[in-house]
Image (cartoon, rainbow, N blue to C red):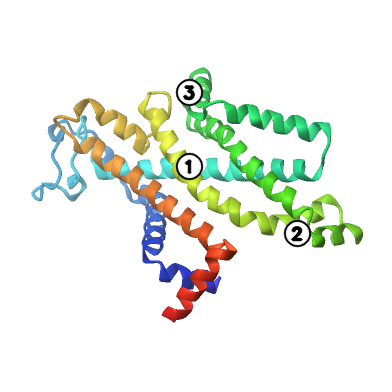
Amino acid sequence: MRFYWKMLRSDWIALLAMGFLLAMVLVALVGPLLIEPSMLRLNLRARHLPPFQLDQNWMYFLGADALGASIIARMVVAASTTLAIAFATVLLSLVIGTAIGLVTALRDNWLSAAVMRAIDVLLSIPSLLLAMVILYALGAHPINVIAVLTITRIPIFARTARSEALEIRERGFVAAARVMGSNDMHVIVKHIVPLVMPTLLAIAALEFAVVMLAESTLTFLGIGVQPPDVTWGLMVAEGQPYLASAWWVSLWPGLAIASIALCATIIGNWFRIANDPTLRSRLKAEVTSHA
C-alpha cells in the first residue's frame, strides 16, 4: 500500500484525479444533508438567473434553472443519485461478472459453455439499445436503471475474469494446490482472485466512467431517471431547450459528468500501469529516483 501511495504521489495528474473523485464522493455523501428544503424551493423571480451574480445569494452563484431553483443545490442533490447509480452498477457487475467468469473457467462442462454463449449474445447486442428497450418496458426508476446497466456491463467482467483464470489455472502452484486436496472454491479464493482482481479493478474504474455516460445518455433521451429524482444527466436534458438563452443550466452538470468520467479514466489507466509488471518496474525506478 505504501508503494502505491508513493507511485500516486509521483504522478501528479493521477493524484489530482483521485483527489477530485474523493471530493465528489464527499459532496455526494454529505452535501444532501446540508441542503435545506428552502434551497430547492422554486422561485420564479429567479428564473434563468445568470451565474456569477455577486449581489445574489451564494446558492445562485452558478445561476438558476427554468423554475428558479438553485443550480448549486440541485447539483449537490443530483451528485448522490448519479454517483450511487454508477457505483452500484459497477459493484454489482464486478461481483456477478467475476463470479461467472471464474466458475466457468474452472468447470469445463455443458453448463459453463451455455453460460458463456449467453454472455456472447449479450456482448453482440449494443448495450445502449438493450438498455433503452428494457427501460421502455420496465419504466425509468433508478433501481431499473441500475439493473439494466448492470446487465449490460456483466459480460465485460465475465469475459475478462474467465480469460485470466484460464491462464492462471494452468500454472504450477494451482496444480500443486489441487494435489494437496484443494477444491475449486479454495483455488478461486486463495490463488486466482488475488491475481485477477487488479485487472478487474482497473476495468471497474474505466467502467465507472462508461456507466455515468450511459446513464446520462439514457436520461437525456427521456428514458432514464425522471423527476422527482434528479441526476446530472436529467439536469442536462432539462436545460437542452434553453441552450441559446440559458446555457448554464446544462453546462455545469455537463462539466461535472465530463470531469468525473475523465478522472475515473485517468485512475483506471494509472491502476493498470501500477499493476503491470513491465510498466511497474519503470514506475519503481521513477519513484526511487524521486525519493
Mark 1 highlights which residue?
86
Whole-percent x, y for residue 275 in the image: 57, 62
Whole-percent x, y for residue 126 in the image: 52, 27
Q: Nearer the viewer, residue 196 or 142?
A: 196
Element type at mark 1 = helix
Residue drawn at (48%, 45%) of the image: 208
Q: Any mark on residue 132, and which?
A: 3
Instruction: Give the quarter of the figure containing the N terminus.
Output: bottom right
- Estimate how packed mark 1 is, as few (under 14), some (14 to 19) or many (20 or more) residues with alpha carbons within 10 Å: many
Q: Amino acid at mark 2?
A: His
Q: Nearer the viewer, residue 63 or 241?
A: 241
Which is in the foreground here, disc 1 or disc 2?
2
Q: CA distance from mark 1 to mark 3?
A: 17 Å
Whole-percent x, y for residue 182 in the image: 87, 57
In this rendering, does residue 49 appear at all?
A: yes
Mark 2 highlights which residue?
191
Q: Amino acid at mark 1?
A: Ala
Instruction: Give the quarter of the figure containing the C terminus.
Output: bottom left
- Estimate how packed mark 2 is, as few (under 14), some (14 to 19) or many (20 or more) residues with alpha carbons within 10 Å: some
Q: Nearer the viewer, residue 218 or 39?
A: 218
| Label pair 1/3, CB-CB below 8 angstroms | no
Which is in the foreground here, disc 3 or disc 2?
2
Please say if 284 is above or below 139: below
Which is in the foreground here, disc 1 or disc 3?
3
Dot 1 or dot 2, earlier in sequence: 1
Q: CA distance from mark 1 to mark 2?
A: 29 Å
Apparent side of residue 278 relative to residue 78 in the rendered image (left or right): right
